[in-house]
Image (cartoon, rainbow, N blue to C red):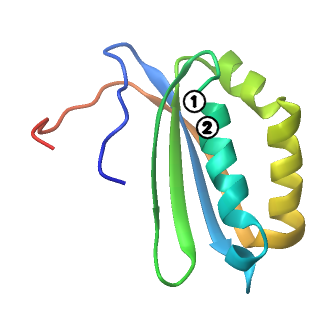
Amino acid sequence: MTEFANTTDEPCYAVIFTSKHAEGARQDGYDATAARMAELVALQPGFLGMESARGDDGVGITVCYWRSLEDIAAWKAVEEHQLAQQQGRDRWYAAYRVRIARIEREYGDSAI
């Protein structure tokens, strides 16, 4: 990923999804579903952006930024997203964690 998410000057929320791929996950439809979820989440009200990385060991972290907790709950309830979550639990992830955090402020160099 080459760009950072465009968050706001107002406090917002981050959904931090950390996962470890199961054996063969990438050959079992994972990449296509992940791409579809990236398309779908970008259409959701309150979505501010996403940053993601995955190591060669299969451990990955994706952070999605949201305007409100209600927007996060609405995304969680999207049927196609729920189906992808079930596939993840059943087929693609050996382990995962979801964390939700409130972001009070941010700072950094914008020359990226």
In the figure, 58 relative to 85: above or below? below
Amino acid type, mark 2: Glu
In the image, taking residue 64 as reference, residue 87 lies left or right, namely: right
**The C terminus lies in quadrant:** top left
Query: Tag 2's secondary structure?
Result: helix
Disc tally is: 2
Query: Residue 29 or 92: which is nearer the viewer?
Result: 29
- Image quadrant in which you'd find residue 6: top left
- Image disc number at residue 42: 1
**The N terminus lies in quadrant:** bottom left
Q: Residues within 10 Å of mark 2 (few under 14, many from 20)?
A: few
Residue wearing tag 2: 39
Q: Position of residue 81 (x, y in %)?
A: 80, 40
Q: Position of residue 80 (x, y in %)?
A: 84, 38
Distance (Cα) linking label 2 and label 1: 5 Å
Q: Position of residue 95 (x, y in %)?
A: 73, 71
